[in-house]
Image (spheres, helix red, strand yellow):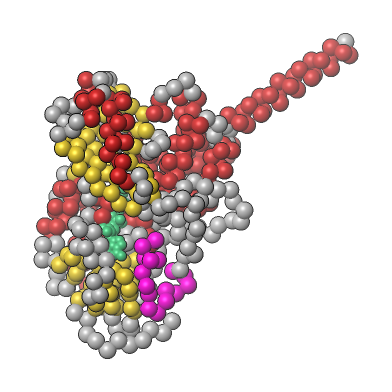
Amino acid sequence: MDLPFGNELPQIDILIVGAGLSGLTSAVKILSKEHSLNVKIIDENNKPGGQLRGKGTCFVSKEQKELIAFITQLNVALFQHDSHEQTLSRCWELDRGLTSVPAKFELWRYINMLDMRMKKFSSVRYEFRERIPTMERHIVTNLFFNLSREFMYQLVHLASGMQASDINYDEFMCLCSTSGGLNVLIDLLLAMPESIMSLSCGKLLETLHEKLKYTEILNNVKAVKVEHFKNYVQVTDSHGKKHKAEAVILAIPWDKVNKLQFEPQLPRQFRIPSRRTKKSKSMITQYSMRYNKPVWISQGYSGQFLNIRPLVVGYALNSGEYCGYMLHTVEEADSVRTTVLDLLAEQFGEEMLDPLTYKQETCELNTAIHKPQIKPWHRVIWSSSAAAATKDRNLMAGAVESGVRAAINALFVIRPQVVCWRDLQDVQDKNRYVGPSPGYFAGLLSRLNLYNITFYGVFVIGLICLLNFGYGAIG
Ligand SMILES: Cc1cc2nc3c(=O)[nH]c(=O)nc-3n(C[C@H](O)[C@H](O)[C@H](O)COP(=O)(O)OP(=O)(O)OC[C@H]3O[C@@H](n4cnc5c(N)ncnc54)[C@H](O)[C@@H]3O)c2cc1C
């Protein structure tokens, strides 16, 4: 596509739209390679941080080596996650009720089966077969108990930003293979086992700010229009102000990219057909509160909490601090505090209803069902964990991966002389799904579930009875 020539002079070298972890990472990386560049960041929110805002602690797994290296470089401490004394139990809805044991059994079998099949989707295939069942259908045909089905519906929703009825099996498997697999997502977003590490999101954001203290970060500025010229890019914000830059990094999720007005129109390879979803958009509210003592410990709980519908996750930090999040619709936003406190009080006692302090932040749940966008469009470069990460997508590690890639791509455009051969590694598609790769027999066994075991069981018993009867009749 031929771009028109613009006849103005850009005032900025690189404009970054979105001050989430990926946008901030890009800025830090760019300035570490060439500190004389004029970098500007705009964000539609009233403070930077994106999804990290208002979150007490984030979890990192030992396999996320690039993220750990980035955090270590920033001098932010990583702690071995301490899920409290071993004697204390977790408080998950999945552990309660008569059907809990078989429901958990079939659920873990199902999750492991999906993880075993994921390698097939790991080449960022994103070429979907026709007539593939929706995830809802797949779950219903593989899981018998309501408890395990509901857990899977919520997990699909959390990972993809879509209801299980709106995403098909192939799309979900492709997405999960770029997220590190279902077990990784469960560990980092729901279970937080002792094997993973934690870090303070506040400290991470503070350090990134410190590194960017001479960089202009404008809050409450939403990008609405992107005009792409041969020699620069012009971004118009919601106040009508025009920002001209030699290169632009759009560090925002892909559904937000699709809401921008592009001139000329986005080339076909970047256009994703908009999808009609049956439900309203989903929001996620992160809460953190403080009590004068850890009430849950006196009840014998570690503080780890999981309610399936609505999805409310909770975990205890130090002595009296309690954090977590709730998945909800726009209409339910006002009742989050009451819902969370009521659910926690039901489990840990009435004292939970009166925290000393209570804070919450709401953001839209990102959808990530498209192919990761790693190739820039001339001077427009895509970033964000949901839009462009090819490993640990929708996680912090994905935000850092896509942020670093976008930084190198932007430098390629405006200062190619500072890019060295080592940086080329960062631009590559990571595409390294390291989940289990089963042998033929293990793969076959993983297909067994309560449905087909019951079917085969009844069939074999029926056959034995029939043979017995037949022999009896002959004898
Ligand atoms: C509840 C919850 C718990 C999580 N826990 C973990 C965890 O334990 N471990 C882990 O690894 N990951 C975790 N994550 C995921 C991790 O936080 C995110 O993947 C990461 O922060 C995404 O960063 P990002 O920069 O790609 O996107 P975002 O954080 O979404 O940033 C995008 C930014 O762009 C801005 N923006 C959007 N549109 C525009 C526009 N038009 N103009 C200007 N600005 C715009 C937004 O305001 C936002 O600030 C969690 C996420 C959530 C929601």
Q: Nearer the viewer, residue 184 or 291?
A: 291
Was residue 272 drawn as part of the magenta stretch in this picture?
A: no
Q: Nearer the viewer, residue 73 or 183?
A: 183
Q: Position of residue 386 (x, y in %)?
A: 36, 56
Residue 426 seen in render: no
Q: Where is residue 373 in the image (x, y as percent from the top left)?
A: 40, 64
Could you tell me which quadrant the C terminus lies in? top right
Q: Residues in magenta?
A: 255-270
Residue 160 seen in render: yes
Residue at 22% in and 55% down: 49
Q: Count all numbered tags in the image, as a single digit.
A: 0
Could you tell me which quadrant the N terminus lies in? bottom left
Q: Position of residue 24 (x, y in %)?
A: 22, 60
Residue at 11% in and 62% down: 213
Q: Is residue 77 above or below residue 224?
A: above
Residue at 13% in and 73% down: 36
Q: Where is residue 252 in the image (x, y as percent from the top left)?
A: 32, 61
Q: Which of 117 and 277 is in front in this view?
A: 277
Question: Horizontal placement of 97 versus 327: left or right?
Answer: right
Was residue 258 drawn as part of the magenta stretch in this picture?
A: yes
